[in-house]
Structures are given as C-alpha cells and as structure tokens.
Amino acid sequence: MAATDQTIKQVNTLGSSDYKYGFSTEVDEIRPPKGLNEEIIKFISAQKDEPEWMLEWRLNAFKVFNKLPKPQWAKLNIPEIDYQDCYYYSIPKSLKDKPKSLDEIDPEILKTYEKLGIPLKEQKMLSGIAVDAVFDSVSVATTYKKQLSDLGIIFCSISEAVKTHPELVKKYLGSVIPVSDHSFAALNSAVFTDGSFIYIPEGVRCPVELSTYFRINAMNTGQFERTLIIADKDSYVSYLEGCTAPMRDENQLHAANVELVALDNAEIKYSTVQNWYPGDKEGKGGIYNFVTKRGACRGKNSKISWTQVETGSAITWKYPSCILQGDNSKGEFYSVAITNNMQQADTGTKMIHIGKNTSSKIISKGISAGKANNTYRGLVNILSKAKNARNFTQCDSLLIGNQCGAHTVPYIESSNSDSMVEHEATTSKINEDQLFYCQQRGLNSEDAVGLIVNGFCKEVLQHLPMEFAVEAQKLVAISLEGSVG
Amino acid sequence: MLEIKNLHVSIEEKKIIKGLDLSINKGEVHALMGPNGSGKSTLSYVLSGKDKYEINDGTIDYNGKNLLELDVDERANEGLFLAFQYPMEIPGVQTSFFLKTAINSKRKYLGQSEMDALEFAKLMKSKAEELNISTEMLKRDLNVNYSGGEKKKQEILQMSMLSPKMAILDETDSGLDIDALRIVSEGVNKLRNSDNSFLVITHYQRLLNYIKPDFVHIIADGKIVKSGDYSLALELEEKGYEEISQTA
C-alpha cells in the first residue's frame, strides 16, 4: 500500500478522537438566555460595568450589523448561522467578582490551564512569557503585570482597559477595523466579551513575549474576542495567542477582531497558533472561526509582522492584513494553514500600500489532506501615492491524498508604475519517493509525513518565537495524523 | 542473514525478476552485477519494501523473519539499509536533524531511550570526518543542492551512523569521481565485520577493486546466471555480459 494511502487510512480510523484539548471543565456558568438583541448587549455591558460610551458604541455596532449582509467572497461552504441560537456571554460564577489574585481563582479553571500547558502561577513563570488567559468570555489572569507596568507597558484585558484607560481605547478601538467593515466585524463590535489590551510606550522594547490563551469551554457559546495593541513611537512588542476548545457535536462560533497600531519606527510581531476543535472526521461539530485581524503601520518606518499556524477549526475565515500608511513601512504575513478531514480554510492577507517606499512580503504554505479544502486568498493593493512600493508573494500548496483541494486566489492591483510586485505559486502532492526514503531510514509513515511537511513549512515556522516553534512543529505533525498527511 | 528463494516479481504486469535465488551469510560481501534492465535495482527495492512491486512467488527470510511481511520502517529498524542510487532531497529538513531522527526512530523501535544531544554530536562529527564531510554540509537541508558525490557520501554517512546488519548499495559508484569512490569505499570497508553483510549492486568491476567481495553474482533477465568469487568480476570485465551470460 502506498505510504500516503496508508496515512489516509490511518487518519480515517483515527478520526478526530486524538484532539488532546477536547476535554471540558465542570464549572458553574453565569449565562443570559440565548439570542442576539439589544437586551443581551446591555446585559454584557452591565456585567462588565462598562461606561455609557462603550454601551453606545456596542449598540451602534449592532444596528450596523443588522444592515450588513454576510460576506460571500470566500470559497467556503458555510451553513446558515442562526445568531439567535447562541449564547453571547458566559462566565464561570467564581469569576463574577473578579479575583484579585491567582489564589482566588477557581482551582478547576486553573487545572484547565494546567492541562493546556499554560502555567498561570507567577512563580512558575520562568519562561519569560507574560500570559493573559481568556476562559469563555472573561480574562482570568494577567501574569507579570507588575514587572511590565514598571516599564509603562499596559497589558490587561480589554474590559479592564475600557475602565482604566478609556482615552486610549476611545482613540484606537475601531480605528483599524471600522465597525461597518463587514458583518462579522460589526457583530464582534456589538458583543465582544474579552481579549487583550496592550500599550507599549514610546521608546520601550517589551522585554518578554506577551501572550494570550483563549479557551472556549461552555456549550453553545460564541467567543468574541477583541484585542487591541498599540506600539508607540520607537517601541517593539512580540505577542502570541493560542486557542483551544472542547470537543462538542455542535458548531461553535468564534468571531474575533484584532487591531494593531504601529506608530513611527515601531514594530509589532503577532503570532497565532490556532488549534480550535476541528470537528470529527465526518465534519460534525467544530469551531467556525471568523476572524478579522488588521494592523495599521501609521508611522514612518513602522513594521507589522503576522505569523499564523492554523491547524484547527471546522471553518477558518481569516485575512490578517497590513495597511502601510507610513513611508518606508513594512508588512509581513507568514502563514501555515493545515486542513484535514472535512475542514475548510479560506485564509490569506491584504497588503495595502499607501506610503512611499512601503514593502510587503507574503509567504503562505497551505496543506490539505482528507476531503479538506484550503484556499489562499490575498490582495496586494498599491495606491497611486505609494511610490517605489515592493511586494513579494510566495504561495505553496501541498496535497496529501486525492480527495482534497488547494486553491490560490491572488489579487494584485497596482496604480503606480514605480512599484514592483512578484508572485510565485506552486502546488504539489506529497512525494511518495521522499516518504519511502524517510521510511527506509526507520521513520514510520506518520513521522515521515510530519518531517516532510515541517520541512515544507520551515520558512514560516522559523518566524515563530522559539518556545512556540517547537510546539507548532508538533502540532503540524499531530494535525496531519491520520490524514496526514 | 538473508535467504531469497525462487523470487518472482512483476511491476504493472511486467515480469522483472524470474526465479531468483540468493543466500547471504553473516560477515559476507556479495556483489551483484548485471546489465541495465536485468532486475538489479528492482531487487534492492523489493528487499527494502517499496510499493508497486508485486511478489508473484518465492520467499525471503531475513534473520529468521519473513521479510515480506514487514513494513518499510520495520525492515529498516531491523537493520536493513538501502544506500539509494538516487538519494531524495528533503527541503527544509536539516541533514543533522534527519540523521538524529533516523537514529532515534531505530532506538525507539528497539526500546532504547533517545540518544542525548552531546553523544549524537560526537558520533556525527567522528563519522563525518572519516568521510571527509564538512560540518557546514550537515547544517544544510538534506541532499538539497548537494553534488552527486556529496549525496553518495551522505548515504554512506547515514549507513555508518545506523550501522546496519544488512546493507544494500545500489550503484553507489555511479557518478563518483575516483577520489570520492575511494572515500566511499573506505567508509564501507571500515564498517565490514563478522556480524554484518553487504550486497553491492554495480555495473562495473571498478568499485570491486576497492570493496573486495567474497562472492560475485551475475544477473541477467531477472535471474542469477552465474556465481563465483572475485575472479568472476575480472572475467566479466574482460568478456562482457553477453559472452558470460551465454557461457553460463
């Protein structure tokens, strides 16, 4: 039997029972009734004790949401989503009165994070990573807060920032992703629950990796995370998010908005390892992941770099983008998207060149196995004032088995004759001879596939922070188990 | 070590090997010589377990096990090694990482713990030096942009690090200049001992000047037509395949 066939057979027998994050945690939850309406939005805002302006902002977003159609551009088969059949807010009861220290957090929740490998206890935080953890709708703990605040760095949950730093939130929230951008963006703006807020002051280089871990625990709950990162002049920050969810037969909705702002000479590096529950091998259950991520390089010489490893979710719809306003600013997008079984992904980026001498780089690696479909969709738009703009794009697709699909949809628009745009694309099947060679050296078929695919993704994985690169390599191999492809 | 009896192999209905018998004992080096299309490479692939070959008849016993029932990686971890005629390029995978993965796969199979990083580095360094392979090369992606000679040396490096019981060298001499041929042959000779065996597949007698076989077999049209000692290789060099096959 051919090694790939064998792998496919193994994947089929494995199904998704190997999703090791598929446990759920027994905690009492506070939840308003299902459904999406103004009352729910008022409830969320009141639960969070938000100021009046925030509630108004939400209610306005809800009005916009009601007028916007669902985006249709993606090559995805998205079932009709019944927004009324979903809970929009869920918090463990024990977090209602926000714990003041980690000792007050429900031990069950701490255990969940321990199982996920996220140490919250600060004394364990030797790895040099500050973590904010979001459990369903609320932020559980932010480690390292004191050390960061000595540098003037603000790292807290967005709910907290609304109250403690309203001037920054008012100034920047919705400034990169307008509420009216598309319906998921508007939905998130109306019902967002939690996420991270980061402000790096002028001239500060954040000494640790900042990280958020998102976890959907409750049933039928949507998670609407909202993250806002502002890097002031001459500052630098590297941020990483990780995501998991329990195995459930129902689909769960995740619609996040992430906004980044980089001022003069500032740099933001944003890395994602997304491993939401993908559904079982027949496509039952799994997370619908509709994410809007956008960064504005507002200042001259600023830089925003997105790195993503997308292995989970039943549907991934995500285009982390850069608006290159400042002269000489740079945008980068490094992506690995793996789809197996019945998973669907439509992901890519937009690079909008506005300033002079702006440059962008796109490296996308799509891997498709099982009956999955994987699409790269990208836009490189060079506006007339973007003199001397540069873009380089490389999209490689790897197919495992003969029932999956890979699609590449690059749009290039240039209104400037000084600009230079390069696009390279390849599509290949995993090579039987390479697999045989590895197996002849003693690797079993799954390890052989993992090795070859990791090699295929190397250009992207090497942009992840060291600690996460190792995790990501394992994840790449695990997600192809069975399919593997 | 290896006992092949009445082997018949076809690929896509075409018969390639037609009743081949070969017995290799511990500590022996056998050379298999034959013209293009005689079934030499097919035999190496069948022994290592590549798909697409249909075994129509015959048995292969390997150290008391039915070789044909083992998966490719099981055969490898049981000590069967194939030095490829055309080693594969694996982009994005560092050569040293590949070597480490291979060694640890075998150790895992044998129920041993992983080799620690320092021990591995020492082993790799000493073996690479013997073969005149630079440490810089070990940092490059496996076989990517290697010259023909470098690829063959890499195969011998892998072989010496995995120290197989039964090594098959499939036209390892092709594409090698005289210096590389000498280095590769020395690598093989160092590995020879009373516990392991080699099957050296080649077109030319030249390689056998460096790796002295105990037995020489001539294969033609899927069968071994003549066997002898080293002098048979010399005779072949003189007379050519056609004449030898006819007199068989």
Image (tube, rainbow, N blue to C red):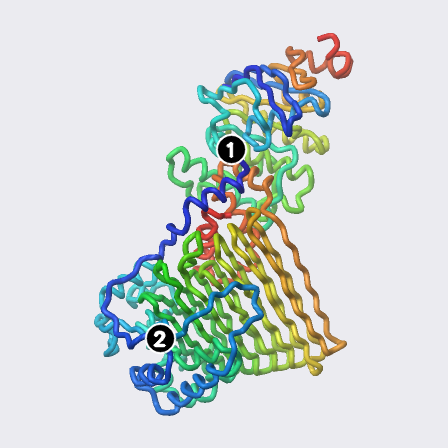
Query: What residue sits 71% from the left and 79% below the top?
Result: A387
Instruction: Name the one closer to the observer, A361 or A288.
Output: A288
Could you say where residue B14 lies in the image, as x and y percent from the top left? 66, 25
The residue type indicated by label 1 comes to Val
Above or below — where is B29 with respect to A161?
above
The residue type indicated by label 2 comes to Tyr
Could you say where residue B244 lies in the image, as x and y percent from the top left? 74, 12
Instruction: Name the one closer to the observer, B156 or A13.
Output: A13
Q: Are marks 1 and 2 on the same chain?
A: no
> As drawn, is A47 to the left or to the right of A166?
left
- Residue A234 visible at all: no
Q: Secondary structure at mark 2?
A: loop
Foreground disc of the pair 1, 2: 2
Instruction: Name the one closer to the observer, A149 or A426.
Output: A426
Q: Quadrant of residue A158?
A: bottom left
Report the Cα–Cα distance between label 1 and label 2.
52 Å
Q: Which mark is residue A88?
A: 2
Could you say where residue A351 lies in the image, as x and y percent from the top left? 61, 73
Query: What residue sits 77% from the left and 16% below the top?
Result: B240
Above or below — where is A247 with respect to B101?
below
Q: Quadrant of residue A381?
A: bottom right
> As drawn, is A51 to the left or to the right of B32?
left
Please name the residue that numbered disc 1 is placed on: B72
Please give the count of numbered marks on the rendered protein: 2
Instruction: Name the one closer to the observer, A70 or A203.
Output: A70
Q: Chain of mark 2?
A: A
Q: Quadrant of residue A29?
A: bottom left
Could you say where residue A2 lies in the image, as x and y percent from the top left? 55, 37
Query: What residue sits 28% from the left and 66% below the top?
Result: A121
- Residue B84 visible at all: yes
